[in-house]
């Protein structure tokens, strides 16, 4: 169901109950609750991008939801991700996130694709991505990251692609990349890398991989 650019300020109450894909982008939905979608038992993909969204209230479970797009809004904090046990893709790109809590994604362990680019993240806790053992794609590009904790990636056993471009990173801690882990792609461009002894680990890792 395509409700893009309809000038909506609330989620329509007369949506077909068999809706599987719901596009609500480019409206005026500044505050939304997952309770608004409870009648849609087959809902798998939900796009709430470009709404000026400041709050997403979760709790009532959306058992079928697999993809949630919250990009291009004004979220200052990551919504609690309760009641979304089947979620595999989450996009919160180009919001105003400044921090993530430890275990921020522990309620969505099936997540495979996480897009956090274009926010205002400066640092991350070591356990930011704890429990995301199915994650394949992680995009942290175009933030304000100045440093990363050494064990940030330890739980991400299936990670294939990592974007770190466009941050303020000058170095990476020794053993940042889990030993023996094979990535398909790692993007490191557009960072002010400081070429001194602290960068020796990263140079060696690039040569070996």
Image (cartoon, helix red, strand yellow):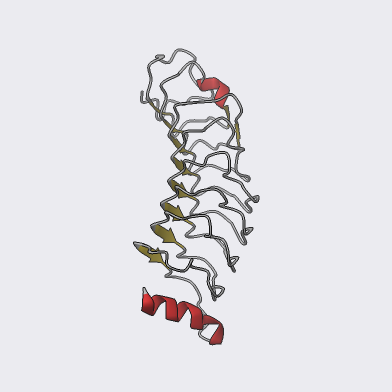
Above or below, 196 against 45 in this view is below
x%, y% of residue 90?
Answer: 47, 42
Above or below, 170 against 138 in this view is below
Q: Residue at x 47, y 39 (%)?
A: 50
Above or below, 155 against 192 in this view is above
Label count reads: 0
Q: Residue at x 51, y 33 (%)?
A: 85
x%, y% of residue 161?
Answer: 39, 58
Towards the viewer: 11 or 207: 207
Towards the viewer: 10 or 183: 183
Which residue is at the far bottom?
Answer: 197
Image position of 128 (left or right of 12) = right
Instruction: Tell me the quarter of the picture where residue 126 sits.
Output: bottom right
x%, y% of residue 111?
Answer: 46, 43
Q: Residue at x 50, y 21 (%)?
A: 37
Image position of 94 (left or right of 45) = right
Above or below, 37 against 165 in this view is above
């Amino acid at each position: 169901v395509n409700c893009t650019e309809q000038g909506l300020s609330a989620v329509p109450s007369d949506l077909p109950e068999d809706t599987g894909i719901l596009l609500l982008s480019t409206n005026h939905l500044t505050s939304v609750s997952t309770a608004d979608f409870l009648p849609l038992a087959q809902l798998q993909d939900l796009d709430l991008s470009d709404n000026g969204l400041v709050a997403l209230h979760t709790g009532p479970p959306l058992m079928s939801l697999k993809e949630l797009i919250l990009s291009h809004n004004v979220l200052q904090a990551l919504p609690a991700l309760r009641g979304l046990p089947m979620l595999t893709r989450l996009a919160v790109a180009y919001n105003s996130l400044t921090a993530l809590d430890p275990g921020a994604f522990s309620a969505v362990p099936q997540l495979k694709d996480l897009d956090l680019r274009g926010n205002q993240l400066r640092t991350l806790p070591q356990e930011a991505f704890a429990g995301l053992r199915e994650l394949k794609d992680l995009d942290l590009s175009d933030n304000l990251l100045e440093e990363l904790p050494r064990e940030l990636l330890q739980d991400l056993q299936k990670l294939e692609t990592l974007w770190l471009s466009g941050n303020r990173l000058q170095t990476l801690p020794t053993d940042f990349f889990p030993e023996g882990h094979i990535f398909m792609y790692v993007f490191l461009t557009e960072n002010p890398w400081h070429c001194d002894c602290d960068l020796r680990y990263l140079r060696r890792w690039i040569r070996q991989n």
